[in-house]
Image (cartoon, rainbow, N blue to C red):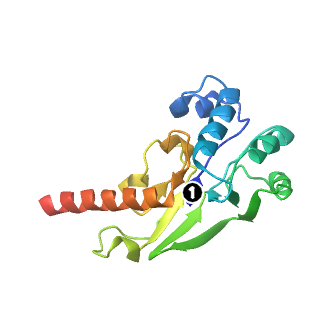
């Protein structure tokens, strides 16, 4: 299976990160729960794309937390992923790729992966969902799946998915549902 997530923010000791939409009582609880929820659905055979901002502050402690994550991890770098952090990431055995952005294909679907929300398609052009390049992103810490209600800009961040990674199948289902909702609203006008 292929999973996506973003903005784990291990060791980020700011209450707007671990509190806020996550509802944790401390940075330690954030670290523990994110790992627990992640590993409850990901296996070591799964590919996981983490779209940036894995850790902050104590690098050695952050690396120990990332080592606990299952799966073959592809890191798409975010705004907190500094050159020093990248050097630490390169030492991890569960990391298979580190890049700033990439495109992956899944069946008929194409996904542009980056940390930031990026307009890649118009949602009012009448094309089928799979004919669009779909942006998967994090960064916003928003609780909603879609950036500005655009069905082709999907937020994979932990804040939108109750701390869990989201599968590619669920993403496709959510996008189709959102596109149908928008089409129905448009048909009513």
Q: Is residue 186 left or right of residue 131?
A: left
Q: Is residue 49 left or right of residue 117?
A: right
Quarter assignment of residue 152? bottom left
Above or below, 76 relative to 60: below
Q: Is residue 84 left or right of residue 8?
A: right
SS type, badge 1: strand
Q: Quadrant of the C terminus?
A: bottom left
Query: Which residue position holds label 1?
Result: 3
Above or below, 92 relative to 105: above
Asked whether 117 or 143 is in front, the reply is 143
Quarter assignment of residue 173? bottom left
The answer to whether residue 47 of the structure is visible from this angle is yes
The percent position of residue 162, horizontal first and vertical second, equals: 51, 39
The percent position of residue 82, horizontal first and vertical second, equals: 78, 53
The answer to whether residue 118 of the structure is visible from this angle is no
Crowd band around label 1 with a 10 angstrom C-alpha radius: few (<14), some (14–19), many (20+)? many
In percent of the image, x 82 and y 57: which residue is there?
93
Q: Quadrant of the N terminus?
A: bottom right
């Amino acid at each position: 299976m292929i999973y996506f997530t973003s903005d784990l923010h291990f060791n980020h000791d700011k209450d707007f990160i671990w509190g806020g939409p996550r509802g944790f009582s401390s940075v330690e609880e954030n670290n523990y729960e994110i790992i627990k929820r992640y590993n409850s659905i990901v296996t070591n055979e799964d590919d996981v794309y983490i779209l940036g901002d894995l850790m902050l502050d104590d690098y050695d402690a952050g690396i120990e937390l990332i080592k606990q994550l299952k799966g073959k991890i592809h890191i798409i770098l975010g705004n907190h992923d500094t050159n020093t952090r990248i050097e630490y990431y390169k030492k991890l055995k569960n990391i298979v790729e580190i890049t700033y952005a990439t495109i992956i294909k899944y069946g008929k679907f194409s996904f542009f992966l980056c940390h930031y929300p990026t307009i890649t398609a118009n949602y009012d052009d009448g094309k089928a969902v799979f004919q669009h390049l779909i942006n998967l992103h994090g960064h916003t810490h928003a609780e909603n799946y879609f950036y500005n209600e655009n069905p082709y800009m999907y937020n994979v961040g932990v804040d939108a998915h109750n701390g869990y990674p989201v599968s590619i199948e669920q993403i496709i289902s959510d996008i189709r549902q959102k596109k149908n909702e928008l089409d129905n609203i448009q048909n009513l006008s």
